[in-house]
Amino acid sequence: MKILVLTYSLIIAFDSIDSIANVLWLPIFMFLILYGQKIQMFMILRNVGKKLRRLEQMNVSSKNIVLKSLIEKSDDEKIVKERFDRLLSSFVIPPVSIDPKGIMTKLEHILNTQEDNMKDEIKLMTKDQDDTEISVLMNLVEVSLGINLMHKFIRHFYISAKKTGNMMIIAQIQMILPQVMEQAEAYNAAIPSLKSKKPIGDGIGPLVASRLSGESESKEVVRDTILNEVKIENRNAFIIKAKGPGGNVGKPGEAIKRVVEENEQISLIITIDAALKLEGEDTGEVAEGIGAAIGGPGIERYKIEEIATNNKIKFLAIVTKMSEKEAITEMKPEIEKTSEILLNKVKETIRQHSEDNQNIIIAGIGNTLGVK
C-alpha cells in the first residue's frame, strides 16, 4: 500500500514538473524566435570586435616600427612621416579585364610603375642608402601596407554590419576572418626577420641556386635578376635567381625568356621554390611537380609557360612545403636542411630528363633577403 502511495505521489510530482516546464518553455521559445538572431549577431560582432582590436594593435605597431626604421635613415622626420602616410594611402588600379588581350603586358607595366614609385619615395625619405638597404625598407613598407589594408577591410565590414544589422554581411566577415587574422599575424611576425636581414623561408629557392652557382661569375640579365653559367652533371646549366642579399624577388620569367631566346636547344627548365603546405603536412617536406613553381600576380609564370610551350621545352618544379608565416619569417632549421635534399633532387632530375652537353635552365624562385 505504501509503495502504491509513493508511486502515485511521484507521478503527480513528475506531472507537475512537466506542466511547469511546458509553461516556462513557451515564453522561452517565443523569446528565441523574436530575439535569437539579434543575440547571435551580438555574439558574432563581439568576437569580430576583439579580432579587430588585435588587428588595430598590429597595424599601429607595424607602422611605428617601419616609420622608426625610415626616420633612422633620414635627416627630416617631418618629410618621412608625410610621405609614409601617403604611401599607406596609396593604391593600385588593376587593368581593365573585359577585353583580356594584352592584359599581362598592362598588368606588368602597372606593377613595375608601382615598384618604381615606392623605390623613388623611399629614396626621397632616406639618403645615401645602397640597393640592399632600399630593398629591405621596401619589404618593410609592403608588410605595413598589407596589415593596414587588412585592418581597413575588416573594419569596413564590422561597421557596415553594425550599421545595417545585415546578417549576410556578418556571415561574410565571419567566414573570412580566420584567414585574414592568420595572414595578418604572419605579416606582423615577418617585420623582425626583415629588419634583421636574415634569410626567410621563401629564400630556399635562391639559396639552392646560390649553392649550385658556387664561385662562378654572375651577371645581371634583367632588373634585380642575375645569371650564372656552370657545368652540372655534364650539362650546360644557366642558373637564375634574384639579386641578393637584399629582399628582391627579381624577374625570373623575363630572365628565362631571354636565356631561351639567346641560346639554342634548351631542353629543360627547373624551378625551385617554397610552396604553401596543407594542414597536416610537415614543414620542410619536399615535393616534385610539373609546371612553373612561382607565385605572385602571375606575370612571371605566364612568361615561363609561354616560352616553354612555344619552344616545346619540358618544365618541372621542385618545392619545399611551409606555412605562410614560415615563408616570410626567419628560415627555420628544418627548411634550411632541405637545401641538401633539393640539390640532390635537382641533379637527379637533370640526369633523368636531359642528356650530356644539353643546355638547361635552373631558376631559384623567391626572396633573396640574406642570400648572396
Image (cartoon, rainbow, N blue to C red):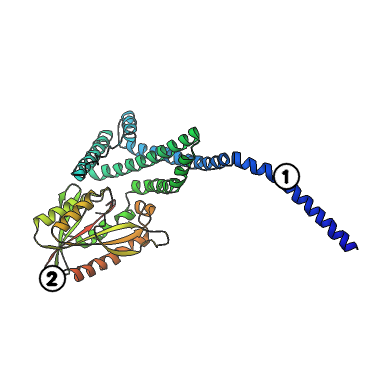
Residue 121 drawn at (x, y percent): 26, 35
Question: Which labelled disc corresponds to residue 69?
Answer: none
Let me know if residue 39 appears in the view: yes
Where residue 315 sits, quadrant-wise, is bottom left
Q: Residue at the location (22% across, 51% down)? A: 300
Quadrant assignment for the C terminus: bottom left
For the image, the number of numbered tags is 2
Q: Nearer the viewer, mark 2 or mark 1?
A: 1
Number of residues whose C-alpha sits closer than 10 Å to that of mark 1, classed few (under 14), some (14–19) or many (20 or more)? few
Residue 323 drawn at (x, y percent): 38, 55
Question: Which labelled disc corresponds to residue 356?
Answer: 2
Residue 132 drawn at (x, y percent): 25, 45
Is there CB contact under 8 Å for labels 2 and 1?
no
Let me know if residue 210 appears in the view: no
Residue 320 drawn at (x, y percent): 32, 61
Q: Residue at the location (87% across, 63% down)? A: 3
Which residue is identified by label 1?
23
Please state which amino acid type lies under the numbered disc 2: Asp
